[in-house]
Amino acid sequence: MINKLLISSLMTIAIIFSACDGDSEGESRLETQVMLDNADYEGVISKLAKSANVSDEENLALGAAYMGRAGLSLSDLVKVIGDSNDEENAFGAFISSIEEATKESKTPLADLQNATASYDNVVGNKCNDNNISDSQKDLCIFKGLSQVMSTATTFSYIADDIGLVFDNEGTDDKLTASTCAMEYALNLENDCQIKVLDDNLTFASKLSYKKIEVTTNGKPFEYLLTDTSTVITKGYCSLEDFSTREDNTTNSDYHICPVNEDPNTKELTTGAILADALNNGVDAISGAANDDDMQDDINEFKKEVLASSGKSSNETITEQDIVNYLNEQNN
């Protein structure tokens, strides 16, 4: 996203993962570290996620495990950040690299959200506090980085080739359609070709959505909507069973499938994920970064998003601001 931020994050990543070192007391901690070293992320999550009392160190291990399960191990993160830093458009390269790293994961976005929550359990709302310790600042940068990674992963769901947009090499039809769907959900004026396919599509999670079709350049794209936003989807599945999820299908009984399968967790909607990540993620990094140049770069990116709506850089980014920014980038 930002060259200086990506460079500094290498050190932060090393600090966070080394915080889980097995040289601390306790056989259980050593066991956790061995599982992380062996990429047994399922084992770490199974061991710690349902514990009644999770320590700060265990939350760090959980964060690392969720990141790993999303497809972003320590070595992956180092490569993503290093490769992005070598590109002229670091943000576009960063998004493309995250998409590539997480494409084999079944639940990358949910895992990144859980990673953020794990780090949040340690630092809470302290990231903008001038009195936090250096180790807490390191955590805040990593918490913010995991949220920004959620932004990159979300882009991978709503566009076919986001790199075209950020490299100013063309437009992406799927992103155009996704932006139209977001506008429709927000009741914003648009000249998009939209057709309602179902007003009450209910999945195995017992959650119901409106299903619409957006046509761009003759290509149809389907979306699920809540009352106010588009739902993040992946593949196709039957209404009765999420385990039927497939990347492509000709089965008329299958529908685009929501990423969220749990009715008890917060719905994963495009605008909410992007707004939360771009506000809280960037702010977490900004508050913890003691570097004037880095601060300038972070502020510049947020300013670009807000400028698309004619707003000043100190305002909060809304879903409508994101729609305006996507439209501007995709022209």
Image (tube, grey):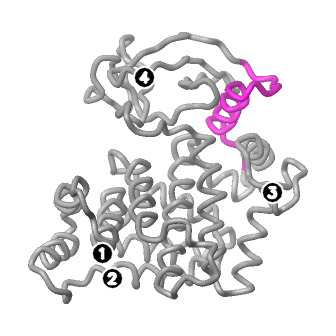
Name the residue tied to disc 4. Answer: 207
Question: Callout 4: helix, strand or loop?
Answer: loop
Give the side of residue 216 with respect to residue 42, left or right: right
Nearest to N terminus: mark 3 or mark 4: 4
Front disc: 2 or 1:
1
Q: Residue at x 77, y 46 (%)?
A: 321
CA–CA distance in space, label 3 to label 2: 35 Å
Q: Amino acid at mark 3?
A: Glu
Question: Which residue was labeled with disc 3?
Answer: 315
Q: Amino acid at mark 2?
A: Ala
Secondary structure beneath dot 1 equals helix
Label 3 neighbour load within 10 Å: few <14, some 14-19, many 20+: few
- Whether 201 is drawn above or below 174: the answer is above
Instruction: Give the alpha-carbon distance from disc 4 to disc 2, as whole Å.
Output: 39 Å
Q: According to the image, label 2 marks what residue?
A: 19
Query: x%, y% of residue 23?
Result: 19, 89
Q: Earlier in the sequence, mark 4 or mark 2?
A: 2
